[in-house]
Amino acid sequence: EVQLVESGGGLVKPGGSLRLSCAASGFSFSSRSMIWVRQAPGKGLEWVSSMDSSSTYIYYADSVKGRFTISRDNAKNSLYLQMNSLRAEDTAVYFCARGDRRGGLPFSMSDYWGQGTLVTVSS
Amino acid sequence: DIQLTQSPSFLSASVGDRVTITCRASQGISTYLAWYQQNPGKAPKLLIYAASTLESGVPPRFSGSGSGTEFTLTISSLQPEDFATYYCQQVNSYPLTFGGGTKVEIK
């Protein structure tokens, strides 16, 4: 069974930093792209960042570029999101998701999702 | 960036109704579109990918169609567990983008 478990969320002051983790199990983590998606309270889904299986291709939303860094440790089956210079508008539930390109998709959709971890940026 | 516009943003329907949600892309994305369902407080769930391919385990009352700039998600006979929010997502190019969502509520 595919499982994705996020951790590391919490309350942080504006300008602060936080590192999210996503522990993966039930599939070959090292062969899959991985994705972070966030959802502000009462709002829709926003794609944040994607990384391919070998950490070669990395993409960020403009809203987080230069402040957030995605990384992975295939030996530990883990995905990370280092978030620096946090702003109030970064307040959201952050979901980790597994990427998949079935059906000839050029880039990965998200076929399995974790339950999310809440990040609150407030003074 | 490719913008996705979903309509309606809110839909009130009854059990057994046929429901159609539209997703329009600001430029052509072939069939590189996915649909997700999200219940309150839960993670999104993949329903359909490549515009019309049903994800394994998803009931056949769900179907998707379209290509280019216009796509639809149809629920042929709404069930109680289908009252949720639905999102489309394009995976044609980065940045990946989601539609604003369609909340389906009980009439």
Image: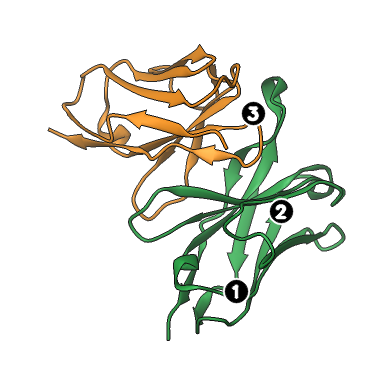
Chain colours: A green, B orange
Query: Residue under circle 1?
Result: A8
Image location (x, y in percent) of residue B91:
62, 32
User: What is the CA distance from the residue labelled 3 to the residue labelled 1?
Assistant: 31 Å
Q: Secondary structure at mark 2?
A: strand
User: What is the CA distance from the residue labelled 2 to the residue labelled 1?
Assistant: 18 Å
Image location (x, y in percent) of residue B49:
57, 25
How many dots with numbers?
3
- Could you tell me which residue is drawn at 16 percent across and 26 percent down? B14
Image location (x, y in percent) of residue B80:
25, 33
Q: Please name the amino acid that badge 3 sits on.
A: Asn
Disc 3 crowd rating (10 Å Cα; few below 14, some 14-19, many 20+) is many
User: What is the CA distance from the residue labelled 2 to the residue labelled 3?
Assistant: 28 Å
- Which mark is on residue B92? 3
Q: Quadrant of residue B103?
A: top left
Q: Is residue B56 visible?
A: no
Mark 2 or 1, nearer chain start: 1
- Could you tell me which residue is drawn at 54 percent across and 15 percent down? B68
Query: Residue under circle 2?
Result: A25
> Relative to B22, is A54 above or below?
below
Q: Are marks 2 and 1 on the same chain?
A: yes
* A108 with respect to B54 (left or right): right
Q: Please name the amino acid that badge 1 sits on.
A: Gly
**Is label 3 or label 1 in front?**
3
